[in-house]
Amino acid sequence: MASFPKRQHERGIRLKGDTSMKEYDLLIVGGGPAGLTAAAYALRKRMETMLISTELGGKTNYEFTLPGLETHLVIDGREIVSKFRSQVEYLDFARYIGKVTKLEKVVKGFAATTDERTFKGKAAIIATGVTPKRLNIPGEVEFLGRGVSYSAVSHASLFIDMDVAVIGNGYPALQAAAELAQIAKKVNVIGVPKSHLNSTLGRRLQESGKATFLSAYEAKEIQGENSPEKLIVTSKATKEQTEIPVKGVFVELGYVTDTSMFPRLVKRTRDGRIIVSAKNQTNIPGLFAAGDVTDVNAQQVLIAVGQGANAALSAYDYLLNLK
């Protein structure tokens, strides 16, 4: 590990379309909260680091606002992530803007390949995040961040005494509805099968008196001016349309992990998340993972920040003990 901020010396495998050679102590794939935090910590530890991502900031680039909402009431981790981003984005020798198409185990380390270049590192951190499953209906994109949310954990507290809708087909939707029922005036639960309502959580929601269940309906459109005002749903049996007054729409269909770059490299859960230890270590020595892409309990910015720091420090310990 060389002293920072000297430019990394060139060595290792040959790069695509370039006669130069580079090898790093640590490769970080992903530039969201976890990846940026990992990069900042790695650079502080004087590790020769390369962060590779299509963008810097991840989901913190998208701000959630509501009409009349005072921004100082929202604590979302964006400020701390912006500080890590400002540390990394001007270091052109420590970050590369591009999409990794392949991440693989090679002799004495790992190789990350983009369309134009290949980078090699002694250790690597996967921090590629997740993408929420979308409804793909009119109004969803238009009101994204302005009343449409994919995380009740993050935004439920903003909808005090308001009418909201939760759209989903499983237990995550019931969890979101239960959280909102403590805050909102009314919670319309769309698409959750009746069989789920016999669960402990389902019965608790029914007993709350705040939840209305439309199990045999599907969402068709979100309408409004500056923010959602009504949700149009259609009966699956009769195709009859119903308008539901709402101020917020929570889409709880789950998340998709992009594992195309490493389809069989690491052990994952049934839904595709990378299984990590308390030190954010995967089943492959020297390969770590952090943030939403892991089997973390909740997809939260501050949790991803902590995981990114933990992964970087664990990678540092790994490199210190590497023969």
Image (cartoon, helix red, strand yellow):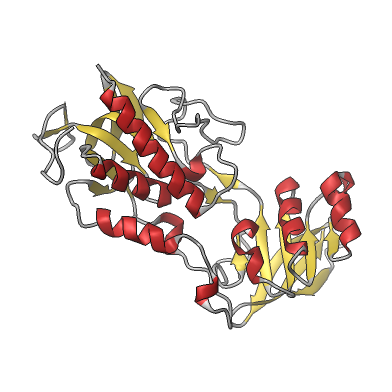
Q: Nearer the viewer, residue 31 or 215?
A: 31
Horizontal placement of 237 versus 177: left or right?
right
**Tally of numbered discs:** 0
Q: 62 left or right of 200?
A: left
In screen coordinates, is 126 left or right of 320?
right
- Residue 307 appearing in the image: yes
| Relative to 43, 173 lies left or right | right
Q: Is residue 76 above or below residue 100?
A: below
Q: Position of residue 144 (x, y in %)?
A: 55, 67
Residue at the image point whose x is 28% and y is 26% from the top = 319
Residue at 74 percent across and 75 percent down: it is 161
| Residue 138 rendering spot, x and y as whole percentages | 62, 68
Image quarter hosting the C terminus: top left
Residue drawn at (72%, 71%) of the image: 231
Residue 58 image position (x, y, % from top left): 42, 55
Q: In the image as oriented, which residue stretches furthest toward the top?
A: 323
- In the rendered image, the quadrant that contains the N terminus is top left
